[in-house]
Image (tube, rainbow, N blue to C red):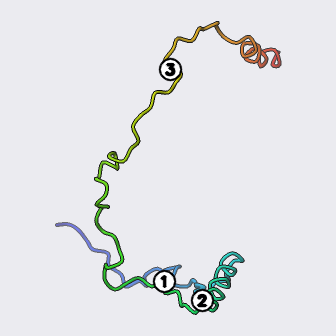
């Protein structure tokens, strides 16, 4: 095939991420610290331990749509429309461009001169 394979036993490059020291216990900011503090005291006062772990099964996870509404929405519970009591889509007269806007557009040319 007239091809020479240039194979060497060079050491592979070092992965720079392998040298990174990750902090798996970072310092918590004030808001998180306060939330944990308040949670601890609420659990103590109410004699209740808040368990936020996910369940092993899907018993507490809703995977189906809400049976009250279809995928199109809850149209059957909308209130009937009432007349607005004021007109809409009426014609609006046009008196041309506002003179203040025309003066502002001209101000750049005046300032540059």
Residue 52, numbered label: 1
The residue furthest left is 1
Q: Position of residue 81 (x, y in %)?
A: 41, 34
Q: Secondary structure at mark 3?
A: loop
Circle 3 packing at 10 Å, graded few (<14), some (14-19), many (20+), is few
Say which residue label 3 marks.
88
Residue at 49% over, 87% down: 51
Residue at 64% over, 6% down: 95
CA–CA distance in space, label 2 to label 3? 57 Å
Say which residue label 2 marks.
46
User: Vertically, is 9 above or below 1?
Assistant: below
CA–CA distance in space, label 1 to label 2? 16 Å
CA–CA distance in space, label 1 to label 3? 53 Å
Q: Name the N-terminal-most of marks 2 and 3.
A: 2
State which mark lies toward you, 1 or 2: 2
Q: Name the N-terminal-most of marks 1 and 2.
A: 2
Task: Name the quarter where the N terminus is drawn.
Answer: bottom left
Residue nearest the viewer, comparing 42 with 40: 42
User: Vertically, is 37 above or below 82?
Assistant: below
Q: Is residue 47 left or right of residue 53?
A: right
Q: Name the N-terminal-most of marks 1 and 3.
A: 1
Q: Is residue 73 left or right of residue 95?
A: left
Circle 2 packing at 10 Å, graded few (<14), some (14-19), many (20+), is few
Q: Position of residue 19 (x, y in %)?
A: 55, 85
């Amino acid at each position: 095939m007239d091809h020479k394979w240039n194979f060497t036993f060079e050491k592979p490059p070092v992965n720079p991420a392998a040298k990174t020291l990750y902090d798996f216990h970072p310092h918590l900011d004030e808001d998180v610290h306060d939330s944990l503090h308040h949670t601890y005291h609420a659990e103590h006062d109410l004699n209740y331990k808040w368990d936020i772990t996910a369940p092993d099964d899907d018993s507490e996870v809703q995977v189906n749509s809400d049976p009250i509404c279809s995928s199109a929405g809850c149209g059957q519970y909308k209130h009937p429309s009432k007349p607005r009591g004021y007109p809409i889509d009426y014609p609006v007269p046009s008196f041309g461009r506002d003179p203040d806007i025309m003066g502002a557009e001209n101000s750049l040319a005046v300032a540059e001169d």
